[in-house]
Image: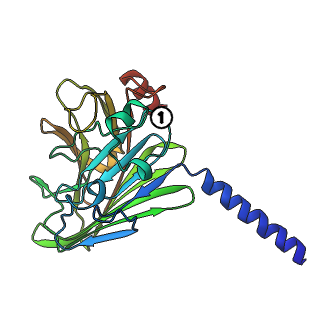
Amino acid sequence: MKKRSFVLLLFAVILINQTQAQNKTDVSLFMRSDSLQQVEISDQSGDLYSTIGHHGPAVENEWMALRIYFSDKAAIDVYSKAKAQLELKEKAWYPTAEDQKEGWGADYYKVGQTVGLGGVRLWDGEKVVKLNPVSNRTARVVKAPTCSYMEMLSEDVPYKGRNIDVLVRVTVYSGERNAKVEAFALTDEPVQFVTGVNYHKGQEIYKKDGLIATWGLHPEDVAAELVEIGAAILYDPADFVKTEDDGSQFLLISKPGKQLSAWVSSACGREADINTMKKFIGFLEK
């Protein structure tokens, strides 16, 4: 009986190790002052944009990395990859120009003042409300056996005459290109969330119920070259009351509630398989 128990325990350990070895996701969270990886970072100002590594918490799967800006924007930004591999721990979002030529990814995506790709804000009935000011903002990252996620908790955000806490979680899964974005209003009364996807002049746009996708060049920023990027948000139309185009982003305004979820995806022109808008849409509509 003891031998059987030992065999079962050994099998369980091997299975866990195999699962973890196959987990093609990762997290990254650190201060630039010491570069030490942390699980959680908090600040009462709500703005560590200039002092936190890659401007906020980050997660990745094989095909892309995502970060949430630790600032009033709280937007979601994308890091694109040429190869299916993990890169955050080694390159920390900013490979050199030489690295990029050798096959590493780069930050081709330009967020500006928008929500980026699936970033979350609030709607007060007339306008977008940023998750700011706050009494405290906390970033947290977790690597689990088959997925990784990052969270941003914004506390005491002024909203319609009261202060509320909003938690945003982004989860990437091993073997799944798409990432899940969730928002939770930690309040007794419902709120209206805003999410969406930004775009730039000259990009291709594809829209249908439950899907908005863009493809094309983003303005040059920190990457060594310009590369076409695909970005998409997949959502349940029943969760939203309307869509607005403000000239730089498509905004999805939710029905009143306390939580929201959507999926985001991205691809780039340097990839071997999904490197055009047609191929990207084909993947999204499978």
> Which colouring convention does the figure follow?
rainbow
Q: How many marks?
A: 1
Residue, disc 1: 83
Q: How dense is the environment of label 1, judged by Cα within 10 Å: few (below 14), some, or many (20 and up)? A: some
Name which residue lies at 45% across and 63% down: 142
Return the residue nearer the eye: 114 or 220: 220
Return the residue nearer the eye: 128 or 80: 80
Whole-percent x and y of residue 275?
41, 25
Left-right relation of 131 to 267: left
Location of the N terminus by quadrant is bottom right
Farthest residue toward the bottom? Answer: 2
Return the residue nearer the eye: 143 or 131: 143
Whole-percent x and y of residue 224?
28, 32
Where is residue 277, by image quadrant? top left
Q: Can residue 209 be seen at all in this image of the molecule?
A: no
Return the residue nearer the eye: 244 or 24: 24
Q: Can residue 213 be seen at all in this image of the molecule?
A: yes
Q: Amino acid at mark 1?
A: Lys
Against 92, residue 8 (above or below) is below
Label 1, secondary structure: give it. Answer: loop
Against 149, residue 91 (above or below) is above
Whole-percent x and y of residue 282?
45, 26
Name which residue lies at 67% across and 61% down: 16
Where is residue 32, by image quadrant? bottom left
Name which residue lies at 15% across and 37% down: 248
Name which residue lies at 25% across and 49% down: 195
Where is residue 18, by image quadrant? bottom right
Farthest residue toward the front? Answer: 98
